[in-house]
Image (cartoon, grey):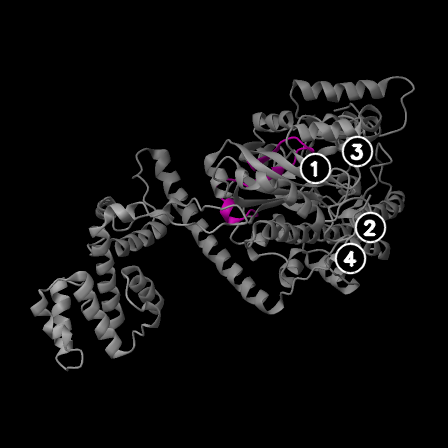
């Protein structure tokens, strides 16, 4: 955590970000005050007195009010979470003030010796907060009869569980289907059971390997033939 | 029937018009007056196999058939285990016992590999010793070998040379259970010990290939082949001198057994013994040990390939997704259940130059391929394409679940040496953009694409006949060879 603090503080131009110790109550308080004074400026100067009383007991109360006024989503969180959000908020404001300047900033990519292999799994880049994603989950959930939950990711994992254990074929329409479809379902369920079993076997083998495995090579032994 | 004396069942072979011409030319040449010596033509060999005691169904020639010792290479035949006269023949397995093909996939794309193709080929060449008389870089003593012969890939797994998933994706799970190292001669063990983890010579190779065409998207997806240009590694190798010695030893024993049990064959090279005789059982146990040797061998080379890639790309083999897609054996005899004339029968199936191709839902194929059928790996020749096929139900009923194994020779080795120049062959490969590393350039022309039948003809014939289904076509970009 403290590393993130340092990065954000130095981005905001704090005088000595490297020495900041978030566990020190006094330093913590003074950073909050610095953020409000220099960056956030949510209150008028005279309203900042509560936060200015770093040495006083009443500071905590003022800090709570301050967070509520900023509508911090982590007002109930740990002190570190709270500070992290405030820092991010300050960075966001700073960026909004100078969009033109920061937009052109280029990230210097570290040079790689080996070719860059990009994983092509499209799920890796899925944006879970996207409204399209949420409404998609909503639709599938209604179809599969999954009850409501505020977190779409939670609902998605419930869906995965249902789809994995109970295949949903179309209801049989012809007589041939009447026999074939249940047998297909049975086959799929069997394959799934078999996969689970094989996975467990593999896990056991790997567990044993941690004890027995010691692969060695000795290039001195090698000889290329004619 | 009646083409050769004593035929008990029909002989058939699968061809298209090009391959048919090659087959019949071979027969015509052999029938010219004054042509003696060398192997009998493939057509005659199929018929001679059909005359062996205990054969059931048909003696089947696959499209890549060409004459070999006793059995033609590309001939499969099944013998009834319940018939006391049924035989097992080393000629029906071949000298390179459990010669086979293994395919590894990666998550790399051709464009990742092209810039360092030469270094990668060199790195593979440095890791995997090739050529006649090459020696492996995995330290082994006599006791290790005994264990490896008995345990097959389980040995490689125990020692940590392979992953648990590799075993899952291997024919027979990489271990023939009836292997008995005590039935193997000391001479075979002495020949085999230093050769573990080496590629060998002849038609064996390791190739870096890229996916060129996908015919069956679903089946390819199940194998982890998702896109054109994806890089794979194919390893084609067998049991080296070990298997050769096991076969040679068995032939000597079997000639005696034939005299004793009065077994008659049309060709001296078809030496065999009753399955239930001591000689028959001893051979099957030694053959199983050689089969295990070959799997340990391919597993060791899998390990070395992963190391070579890991070094070049500075990434763990896990992260490169270097999983084994499948490992097939195309020189082996195995006990299998098949339906013959509507009844289940236990058969000893000889596949020489023929690959097992079991259909979807067969209990002996890995769970991942239950819905697609068993992957069948068809290695091309140096510089030509390779294919991945899948097994079909039709193949199960028509050919005892067997299909072709590769291109199959069109010219004999001697003829290739006379007619082709090795420098030309190498330049031609370079022209195709294929990096090549060879231990013995002068033997290259024996393996030149011109010496072989066209693998595409072979595979298309199998596809058209319905005995296996085309799934993926692979094109080589780098070859290492003995």
Q: Nearer the viewer, residue A78 or B31?
A: A78
Q: Give the quadrant of the N terminus of chain B.
A: top right
Residue A79 visible (yes or no): yes
Callout 3: few (<14), some (14-19), or many (20+) C-alpha neighbours within 10 Å? many
Q: Which residue is mark 3?
A: B68
Q: Which residue is mark 1?
A: B436
Residue B400 visible (yes or no): no
Residue A33 located within the stretch drawn in magenta? no
Residue B216: image x %, image y %? 49, 33
Callout 2: few (<14), some (14-19), or many (20+) C-alpha neighbours within 10 Å? many
Q: Which residue is mark 2?
A: B279
Please identify, in this view, whether the residue under mark 3 or under mark 4 is nearer the observer: 4
Residue B148: image x %, image y %? 71, 59
Q: Nearer the viewer, residue B272 or B190?
A: B190
Question: Which dot marks residue A221?
Answer: 4
Please identify, in this view, whether the residue under mark 1 or under mark 3 is nearer the observer: 1
Find the distance from the CA under tag 1 to the CA under tag 4.
Answer: 24 Å
Residue at screen point 57% across, 37% down: B210
Q: Are marks 4 and 2 on the same chain?
A: no
Q: Are marks 2 and 1 on the same chain?
A: yes
Find the distance from the CA under tag 3 to the CA under tag 2.
Answer: 23 Å
**N-terminal of the two: label 1 or label 3?**
3
Label 4 chain ID: A
């Amino acid at each position: 955590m403290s590393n993130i603090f340092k990065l954000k503080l130095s981005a905001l131009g704090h005088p000595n970000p490297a020495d900041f110790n978030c566990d020190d109550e006094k330093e913590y308080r003074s950073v909050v005050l610095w953020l409000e004074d220099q960056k956030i400026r949510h209150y008028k100067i005279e309203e900042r007195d509560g936060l200015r009383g770093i040495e006083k007991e009443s500071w905590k109360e003022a800090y709570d009010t301050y967070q509520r006024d900023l509508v911090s989503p982590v007002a109930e969180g740990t002190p570190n979470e709270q500070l992290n959000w405030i820092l991010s908020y300050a960075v966001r404001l700073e960026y909004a003030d100078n969009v033109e300047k920061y937009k052109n900033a280029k990230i210097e990519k570290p040079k790689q010796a080996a070719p860059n292999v990009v994983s092509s799994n499209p799920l890796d880049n899925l944006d879970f907060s996207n409204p399209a994603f949420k409404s998609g989950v909503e639709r599938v959930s209604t179809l599969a009869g999954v009850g409501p939950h505020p977190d779409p990711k939670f609902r998605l994992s419930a869906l995965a569980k249902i789809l994995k254990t109970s295949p949903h074929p179309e209801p049989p329409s012809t007589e041939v289907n009447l026999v074939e479809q249940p047998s297909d379902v049975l086959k799929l369920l069997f394959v799934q059971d078999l996969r689970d079993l094989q996975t467990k076997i593999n896990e056991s083998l790997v567990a044993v390997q941690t004890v027995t495995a010691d692969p060695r090579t000795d290039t001195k032994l090698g000889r290329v033939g004619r | 029937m009646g083409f050769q004396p004593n035929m008990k069942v029909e002989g058939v072979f699968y061809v298209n018009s090009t391959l048919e011409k090659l087959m019949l030319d071979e027969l015509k040449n052999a029938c010219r007056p004054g042509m003696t010596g060398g192997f009998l033509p493939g057509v005659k060999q199929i018929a001679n196999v059909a005359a062996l005691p205990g054969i059931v169904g048909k003696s089947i020639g696959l499209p890549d058939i060409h004459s070999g010792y006793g059995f033609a290479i590309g001939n499969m035949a099944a013998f009834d285990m319940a018939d006391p006269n049924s035989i097992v023949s080393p000629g029906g397995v071949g000298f390179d016992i459990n010669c086979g093909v293994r395919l590894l996939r990666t998550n790399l794309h051709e464009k990742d590999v092209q810039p360092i193709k030469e270094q990668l080929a060199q790195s593979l060449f440095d890791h995997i010793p090739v050529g006649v008389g090459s020696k492996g870089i995995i330290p082994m003593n006599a006791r290790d070998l005994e264990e490896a012969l008995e345990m097959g890939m389980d040995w490689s797994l125990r020692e940590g040379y392979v992953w648990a998933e590799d075993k899952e994706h291997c024919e027979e799970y990489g271990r023939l259970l009836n292997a008995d190292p005590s039935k193997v001669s000391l001479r075979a063990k002495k020949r085999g010990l230093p050769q573990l983890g080496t590629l060998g010579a002849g038609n064996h190779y390791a190739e870096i290939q890229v996916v060129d065409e996908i015919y069956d998207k679903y089946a390819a997806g199940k194998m982890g082949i998702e896109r054109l240009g994806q890089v794979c590694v194919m390893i084609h190798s067998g049991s080296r001198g070990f298997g050769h010695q096991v076969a040679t030893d068995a032939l000597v024993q079997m000639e005696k057994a034939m005299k004793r049990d009065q077994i008659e064959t049309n060709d001296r090279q078809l030496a065999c013994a009753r399955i239930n005789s001591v000689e028959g059982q001893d051979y099957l146990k030694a053959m199983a040990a050689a089969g295990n040797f070959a799997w340990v061998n391919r597993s060791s080379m899998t390990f070395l390939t992963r190391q070579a890639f890991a070094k070049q790309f500075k990434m763990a083999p896990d992260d490169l997704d270097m999983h084994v897609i499948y490992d097939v054996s195309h020189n082996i005899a195995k006990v299998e259940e098949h339906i013959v004339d509507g009844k289940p029968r236990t058969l000893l199936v000889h596949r020489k130059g023929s690959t097992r191709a079991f259909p979807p839902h067969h209990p002996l194929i890995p769970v991942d391929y239950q819905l697609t059928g068993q992957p069948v790996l068809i290695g091309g020749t140096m510089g030509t394409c390779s294919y991945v096929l899948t097994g079909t139900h039709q193949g199960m009923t028509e050919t005892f679940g067997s299909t072709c194994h590769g291109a199959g020779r069109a010219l004999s080795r001697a003829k290739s040496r006379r007619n082709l120049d090795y420098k030309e062959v190498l330049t031609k490969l370079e022209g195709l953009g294929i990096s090549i590393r060879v231990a013995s350039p002068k033997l290259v022309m024996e393996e030149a694409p011109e010496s072989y039948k066209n693998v595409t003809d072979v595979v298309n014939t199998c596809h058209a006949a319905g005995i296996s289904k085309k799934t993926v076509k692979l094109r080589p970009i780098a070859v290492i060879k003995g």
